[in-house]
Image (spheres, rainbow, N blue to C red):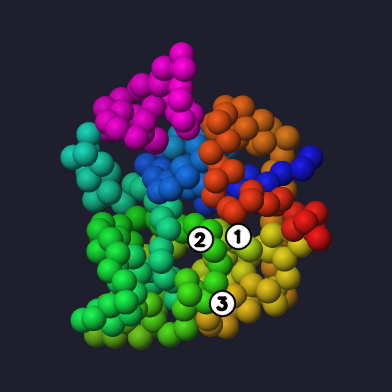
Amino acid sequence: MTYTLAELCITAAAEAWRGNGEVLASGIGLIPRLAASLAKATFEPALMMTDGEAYLVEEPVPLGKRGAYIPKVEGWMTYARVFDVVYRGHRHAMTGPVQVDRFGQQNISVVGDYAKPKAALLGVRGIPGNTINHINSMFVPNHSTRVFVPGEVDMVSGVGYNPARLAGGRSDRFVDLRLIVTDLAVLDFGGKDHAIRVRSLHPGISFDQVQAATGFPLEGRETATVTPAPTAEQLHLIRDVLDPHNTRATVFKENPPGDRREAA
């Protein structure tokens, strides 16, 4: 079956929640939200998921106009209760950083010198507490050296595994970074000292292409596999149940195929 890059990224990102059990799945952005929904609808039914407002739902809520669909509410999840979950470390968020460095430190705050930045963004928001207290993954729609930067990110908004930051008794024992899904590959933190490693290459993409788009040396050249194509069941759920209005087609310019060899 043919599939789009957005659909490939959704199925690849869903794997971030495999084995999580009863944690709050927070997909920040379109692809992460659909990925968390797909995980709950298939292999991780115990995931806790909200309707985007104040209720826990039994099944993922479709994107866009719902028509006659009524969310299947199974509990109350107020803003205060979200913090109760976060404090206990029972959450797995997938975010979209502006910059990431070799050891997974994220920046969502400023680009350039903090005293006189080129661009001021969101501020650090909840990323500092999130990254020291529960599982985190990331989605990057445009894999480039502007995102995967050499050295450190311009501002460390989210905690990573940088050994240089662990002096004086500091520890990364509660840091738990899982996957980074991009338009080129799936990355993890299985390299030396938890450095970023290429886990799989999207169909039609080479390791050298990913390395050229990354500002630091990548590990995994000899072990990287090919990102699995979505199954027929997964495509049915994405297309007919989770995103019936095809909002996912807006994520990547011209909605390219998931197997880039088809575009050649």
Q: Is residue 212 above or below residue 68?
A: below
User: Measuring 62% from the left and 32% from the top, which residue is drawn there?
Assistant: 239
Establish if 157 lies above or below 45: below
- When the figure is inspected, residue 123 is found, relative to residue 254, above or below; the finding is below
Find disc 1 in the rendering and name its residue. 183
Q: Amino acid at mark 2?
A: Val
Q: Is 179 located above or below residue 228 in the figure? A: below
Q: Quadrant of residue 101?
A: bottom left
Is label 3 in a helix, a strand or a loop? loop
Residue numbers of the magenta segment = 48-77
Q: CA distance from mark 1 to mark 3?
A: 13 Å
Q: Are marks 2 and 1 in contact (CB under 8 Å)?
A: yes
Residue 8 numbered tag:
none
Three-letter amino acid code at the position of disc 3: Thr
Residue 60 visible here: no
Question: Which quadrant of the figure contains the C terminus?
Answer: bottom right
Q: Nearer the viewer, residue 148 or 173?
A: 148
| Left or right side of 106 for 230 | right
Which residue is labeled 3 in the image? 214
Label drawn at residue 140: 2
Q: Residues within 10 Å of mark 3 (few under 14, many from 20)?
A: many
